[in-house]
Amino acid sequence: MSTALDFETIRFIGTDDDSVKARLIRAADAEIAEYGVDALQMEAVAKRAGVSRATAFRQMGCLSEVLAQVALMRVQTHITRMLMLIDSKPTVFSKLEAVVVYATREFPVDPAIAALIARHSAFVNDRRVHQHAIDLVGTVLREGQCRGEVRTDLDLDDLVDFLVEQTYLAAEAIDRSEKTVRKRFRHFITPALEARGCCGGEHLSRVTEVEHAVAAAQDALQNLTQKLSAAQPVELTLEEL
């Protein structure tokens, strides 16, 4: 059964949205938080949302879709945090690596998102998941393509889907330590994304990262010099003492 809940409802749902669909999603979210994923029942969701069971099924489709919608809603919160993380990184590949590390660490501990990841074969090409990923890393990948760091022989959609799939796999791995995830990214994901040619995209990105680090160090040194100059001791005369 296909769901009647459109992507825009999920993408822009807010706490002040009192539509039936939004109320059902929030009700399901509350049920999962209180009782867990395995105990989720459409009757309980409908009751909490103040609608009939029939209305809940008509609006949401099947129970597995309800779970997916809750997971997608929760992903929105993580996207906000990851966008802030992206802004703090200087280069294309450091931004992408930070996203994968964060998602691998945080997604599996959320029961709704973990359930979605467990069904990645069905959701890796889901348009809602794809759009969330485009919103998150699309601009970063385009920047990398413009700078000659990310390959341009594949469509942006293909690059995003690959990155999503690799993130799913990393999140499902037994060892999700930061060291292991960074190794996966640098040894397997980066070579697949970087531009082809005599000088790989990752190399260009690392050069840029070093340039940013040097510039930051120079600024810090200049600030320190100014502070030290301003703090020079003043000699006092005997009368002043």
Image: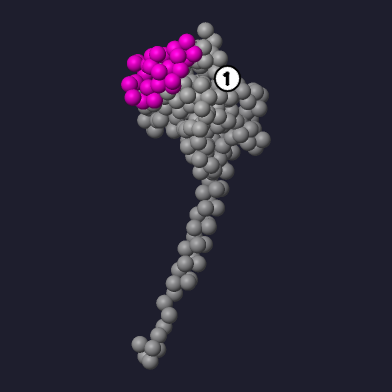
Which residue matches tag 1? 6
Q: Nearer the viewer, residue 76 or 22?
A: 22
Q: Nearer the viewer, residue 31 or 237?
A: 31
Q: Secondary structure at mark 1?
A: loop
Q: Which residues are magenta?
A: 30-56
Q: In the rendered structure, does residue 32 fall within the stretch colored magenta?
A: yes
- Residue furthest to the left in view is 35
Instruction: Kindly tell me whether residue 112 is visible in this rendering.
Output: no
Q: What's the residue at 40%, 85% (across, down)?
A: 236
Secondary structure mainly formed by the magenta segment: helix
Asked whether, in this view, residue 154 is left or right of residue 163, the answer is right
Question: Label 1 is placed on what type of residue?
Answer: Asp
Quadrant position of the C terminus in the picture: bottom left
Picture quadrant of residue 209 = top right
Horizontal and vertical percent position of residue 174: 35, 22
Q: What's the residue at 50%, 62% (across, down)?
A: 223
Q: In the rendered structure, does residue 148 fall within the stretch colored magenta?
A: no
- Position of residue 13 relative to residue 1, above or below, is below
Q: What's the residue at 47%, 10% (across, down)?
A: 54
**Color encoding of the figure:** one colour
Instruction: Kindly tell me whether residue 240 is visible in this rendering.
Output: yes
Classed neighbour count for the residue bearing mark 1: other residues with Cα under 10 Å, few (<14), some (14–19), many (≥20): few
Q: What's the residue at 61%, 34% (across, down)?
A: 139
Horizontal and vertical percent position of residue 40: 37, 16
Asked whether, in this view, residue 205 is left or right of residue 23, the answer is right
